[in-house]
Amino acid sequence: MTRIISNCFICFCAATLLFGFAASAGAQQPAEQTGDLTPPTPKDPRTRARVHTELGALYFQDGNLIVALEELTLAAAIDPEYALAFSTRGLVLYYVKELESAEKDFRRALSLDERNPEINNNYGWFLCQTDRAMESIQYFQRAYGNQMYQTPGSAYLNAGACHIKLGELDRAEDAIRRSLRLMPENPQARYYLGDIYYRRGNFDAARKQLMDMVDLVETQPEMLWLLLRIERRLGNRADAQSLTTQLRRKFPDSAEYQELLKGNYQ
């Protein structure tokens, strides 16, 4: 079965989850500054925490998880009331497999700013990754339903992925198409749409989505594996064999190649 938002997409996922982060962070005034038109000084705790949080997010996107954690932990220490520091650190902790600590950070972030769409989107994503997909949907709905959210496409994308995991393909397609209207060139949305078509048995449409995606993103094992199975279903043996060779040569240690060796083509 196709994995939902795997580690092979780490940099892209980070960008998707945190897209608009700086804008949403910049729009949030420090609690102690509300109503005060005086700009904060560099010594202001909220400003310093925000800077370290943004640095942590950038390191996360770059795949440097250790330094990201250092920056985010510093941000949380500087301003323990800054919700985005905890939410962003929760994402990083997930990737280093500290799931209990990640859950704690997300809960802390929500307790500080429960209506923040970025935090709701991130926590929903975390829940989906930890086999709590049904629970995750409400957080995505809170995110894309917030009129102040500048990047609702990412919440629709994540909601669609989790609906796929739940086997709710109609709801998944609706969410993914909404995401594509907001982010037309998003390769992960096209991948999920191709996955939906494949699960429905519409192999020609699934193939078209994957081929349209080829020019948008570097080849990943998920894409090769799905396309390989599509070509097998269409009876294109030569193309399927070519994809098998690519998967073996480029990603011999991937979960997808292990599925191939086992003959698990479903």
Image (cartoon, grey):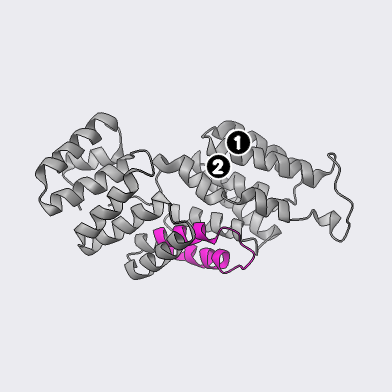
Residue positioned 70% across, 39% down in the render = 52
Residue positioned 58% across, 60% down in the render = 120
Circle 2: residue type: Val
- Figure check: 101 above or below 152: above
Q: Secondary structure at mark 1?
A: helix
| 75 to the left or right of 227 | right
Q: Which residues fall within the magenta stretch?
A: 133-161
Residue positioned 43% across, 60% down in the render = 180
Q: Is residue 154 magenta?
A: yes
Prevailing SS of the magenta stretch? helix
Asked where in the image residue 9 lies, by quadrant, the reply is top left
Residue 90, image x, y percentages: 58, 47
Q: Secondary structure at mark 2?
A: helix
Disc 1 crowd rating (10 Å Cα; few below 14, some 14-19, many 20+) is many
Give the number of the disc on residue 247: none
Residue positioned 26% across, 61% down in the render = 197
Is residue 160 among what the camera can see? Answer: yes
Front residue of 63/181: it is 181
Residue 255, image x, y percentages: 30, 40
Residue 107, image x, y percentages: 62, 56
Give the Cα separation between the discs numbered 1 and 2.
Answer: 7 Å
Front residue of 173/6: it is 173
Circle 1: residue type: Ala
Residue 185, image x, y percentages: 43, 52
- The residue labelled by disc 1 is 68
Disc 2 crowd rating (10 Å Cα; few below 14, some 14-19, many 20+) is many
Asked where in the image residue 69 lies, by quadrant, the reply is top right
- Figure check: 179 above or below 51: below
Is residue 265 among what the camera can see? Answer: no
Q: Are marks 1 and 2 in contact (CB under 8 Å)?
A: yes
| 136 to the left or right of 260 | right
- The residue labelled by disc 2 is 92
